[in-house]
Amino acid sequence: MTKILKSREILLALAILALIALISTRFPGFVAPANLANVFNDTSPLIILAIGQMVVILTKCIDLSVAATLALCGMVAAMLNGMGVPLPVILLAAVVLGAGLGAVNGWLVWKVDIPPIVVTLGTMTIYRGIIFLMTDGKWINAHQMSAGFKDLPRAFVLGLPVMSWIAIAVIIAAALLLNRTALGRSFYAVGGNPHAAVYTGINVGRTQFVAFVFSGALAGLTGYLWVARYAVAYVDIAGGFELDVVAACVIGGIAIAGGAGTIAGAVLGALFLGVIKNALPVVGISPFWQLAISGSAIILAVAFNARQGRAKGRIILKSAEHRA
Amino acid sequence: MSDSTHHTARLIPDRLTSPLARALRSWEALLIVVAVAVFAINSFASPYFLNAWNLSDATFNFTEKAMIAFAMAMLIIAGEIDLSVASIIALASTAMGIAMTAGFDTPMLVAVGIGTGVLCGALNGFFVARLGLPSIVVTIGTMSLFRGISTIVLGDEAFTGYPKSFAWFGQGYVWWVFSFELVLFAVLAVGFYVLLHRTNFGRSVYAIGNNPTAALFSGIRVGRVRFILFLMTGLMSGIAAVCLTSRLGSTRPSIATGMELEVVTMVVLGGVNILGGSGTIPGVVLAAIIMGLVTFGFGLLNVPGIVMSIFLGLLLISVIAVPRLIRRWGK
């Protein structure tokens, strides 16, 4: 029992439930299944990106360029749509382009040995700048997009929109990847102890490269979903969203020093922010509060992580032992 | 993040090179060459470049960022980072706006701006130095928190109508073409040079950046030094907020958005190792001047701001990548 209560994921899930309960005292409609499904759908992009970011953070790196990658791939998807390219090809193109942009980050980290934060701070402005160079700052609006392009994320299958199903598919696939494959375990190994990872025959740099490609591909996928769902593409879409993504990971207990964290944590961290974002207007708090609230949530979460880690000694090693 | 290259760089060489040869091969020497090249290209590209007043205007492109970059350089040398500096500017500027609305005059506004900056720095320092939290996460959090508070206060409004005497900090000139900001930049550059390169405190910053544990065991109060460094970054952000608010004459919650990126770029371009342990103030001064000249030159050629930011992003990556690639291919 104490073990369950000490699990971060359970605590976070309880915190989210408490938050939802609190909101429902002021606005009972919030707990209606349809509304909760809506909150999940609304949080889907954040969930997908947080999973990509989590894998990068596991390997001791950070990807601050996810939002810019999303915007660039979204814009390319919208432009391809304007040229009449069929939807499956557009989807593929968005994912491949995202993976390519991630590969640029990963290559600079792996082969040129530049710290990830510097690489992605740089590519974050470069990728967004490329959108400007491609479009001259022009917008692609709803009427310039085909109906099929816009409808896919919103189409309902088995009671949920396709966007939610994609998020669920990504969650399952990533959980299998991280827990059931050698590659997935090597992400943990590289972040947990790079030197030990080398001695067990893992190529640290290449594993980090793969993590960036993974994160980029997911950002590319999200780029299409974002642009299609909001039916608009311009230079600044998802501006600053990389911070929400990192915040979701930190709140979800992904150790920023690498090597520790779970898919459930990343998903719950994203949902925590998603619930807050959707609840603010409902309970009558100005949306201007959102930035400060997510900032406070990050600080509280990281302080909480550190306290828990200190009480138990090295939490990174502990959790690595658990999973090994 | 493999750190093999850093260890090889610190091996003791068989032969000691002469100080002159070392100076010629230093990062700062390369920066001087780049600065001269940028200056020359600019003078050819635009007839408006070589003009005392235009060049004086160009300095506003870097003075505020450079003030923060000096403190940020010391923080990064010590192995920490502060991504909340631009948000501190937003909060300090908002605090000044509130003080102005409450009827306070210029001296009080300046005190409020600087005081807010110091308080924000103290909060970052408390989380990092006292609670031992990773600075990158803490300052990503306070980055949202500080700008978030500013957004709560202002919403989509703005503070305008600062007193006339307040405008001097961002728009006034001390003598001829030398603006207050430029003079302050020069004074701070000298001050930070002395602090980092000529005092015990400066030595301890390097020591902590190279090996915090060894620094602790050699009697350096690591936590205190880290706290002071965050305090200083907050202080400089507060001072920059006074200058920027005075120059713009208004406060919006979006003020100085993305400036943390430019400050970090400036510091890294100045030759400070992003992983800590090495870097100099003269390097940062040169990087500030180069970035200011490039921005100004692009401005004269009517290049849009976002294209400049692509250039800065490329510059940030290539200044680190090129020497590493050359070293690798040279072997």
Image (cartoon, rainbow, N blue to C red):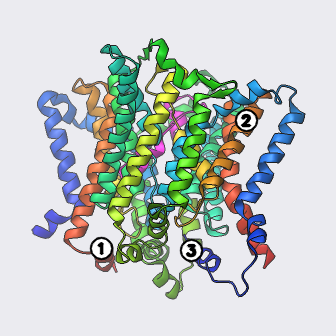
Residue B175: numbered disc: none
- Secondary structure beneath label 1: helix
Say few, some or many: other residues with alpha carbon within 10 Å of mark 2 (under 14 / 14 to 19 / 20 or more). Answer: some
Residue A133: numbered disc: 2
The quadrant in which residue B324 appears is bottom right
Asked whether the beta carbons under mark 3 and mark 2 sit within 8 Å of each other, the answer is no
Q: Position of residue B277 (x, y in %)?
A: 53, 67
The span picked out in magenta is: A222-248
Mark 1 vs mark 2, CA separation in Å: 46 Å
Chain at numbered mark 3: B
At a point 35% along the width and 35% down the height, the residue shown is B116
Query: Does A207 sit above or below residue A66?
Result: below
The quadrant in which residue A22 appears is top left
Say few, some or many: other residues with alpha carbon within 10 Å of mark 1 (under 14 / 14 to 19 / 20 or more). Answer: some
Chain at numbered mark 2: A
Q: Position of residue A191 (x, y in %)?
A: 44, 72
Q: Which residue is mark 1?
A: A319
Mark 3 vs mark 1, CA separation in Å: 25 Å
At a point 65% along the width and 44% down the height, the residue shown is B288
Q: Position of residue A103 (x, y in %)?
A: 63, 60
Q: Which residue is mark 3?
A: B3
Mark 1 and mark 2, same subunit?
yes
Compare residues A256 and A143 and report the one nearer the observer: A256
- Secondary structure beneath label 3: loop
Magenta includes B204?
no
Query: Does B139 sit above or below residue B178?
Result: below
